[in-house]
Amino acid sequence: MDQKKKEISEMNLQEIRGEIDQADSALKEAFLHRMQLVDRVAEIKSKNGDPIYNPEREAAIVRRLTEGVDPQFISEYEEFIRSLLRISRSYQQKKLGD
């Protein structure tokens, strides 16, 4: 690869990395907001005596969120969502001492 092509490639790589950094910041903000809401859900479940794990609700969430996702990314996105749900459930269990 000649120097000019390498410079263009590096510039594009830096631009893409900049966009990834922005996406990561947005994910962080969304995650922290979601966890604040999960905290509130845990309090309500505790008061109402509701179980932390609701498999029907989680299945519905996965179905809703994976709808229309590019097939190229569906497996990884579903794994991401399921991980997020596990983290949320684990947080609630820790908070409620279950």
Image (spheres, rainbow, N blue to C red):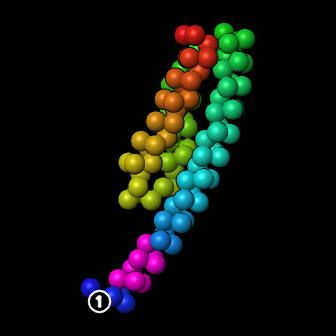
Q: Residue at x 48, y 65 (%)?
A: 17
Q: Nearer the viewer, residue 27 or 15?
A: 15
Residue 56 in view here = no
Task: Say what amino acid the circle numbered 1 marks.
Answer: Asp
Q: Nearer the viewer, residue 9 or 37?
A: 9
**Residue 79 at what x, y percent from top left?**
41, 41
**Residue 37 at what x, y percent from top left?**
69, 32
Q: What type of secondary structure mainly makes up the magenta span?
A: helix
In the picture shown, does residue 85 fall above or below 66?
above
**Residue 87 at what x, y percent from top left?**
51, 30
Q: Is residue 55 left or right of residue 40?
A: left
In the picture shown, does residue 13 fall above or below 42?
below
Q: Quadrant for the C terminus, please.
A: top right
Q: Nearer the viewer, residue 5 or 95?
A: 5
What range is drawn magenta here? 6-13
Outermost residue on the left side: it is 1
Q: Residue at x 68, y 39 (%)?
A: 33
Q: Which residue is mark 1?
A: 2
In the picture shown, does residue 98 fall above or below 7?
above
**Residue 42 at what x, y percent from top left?**
66, 20
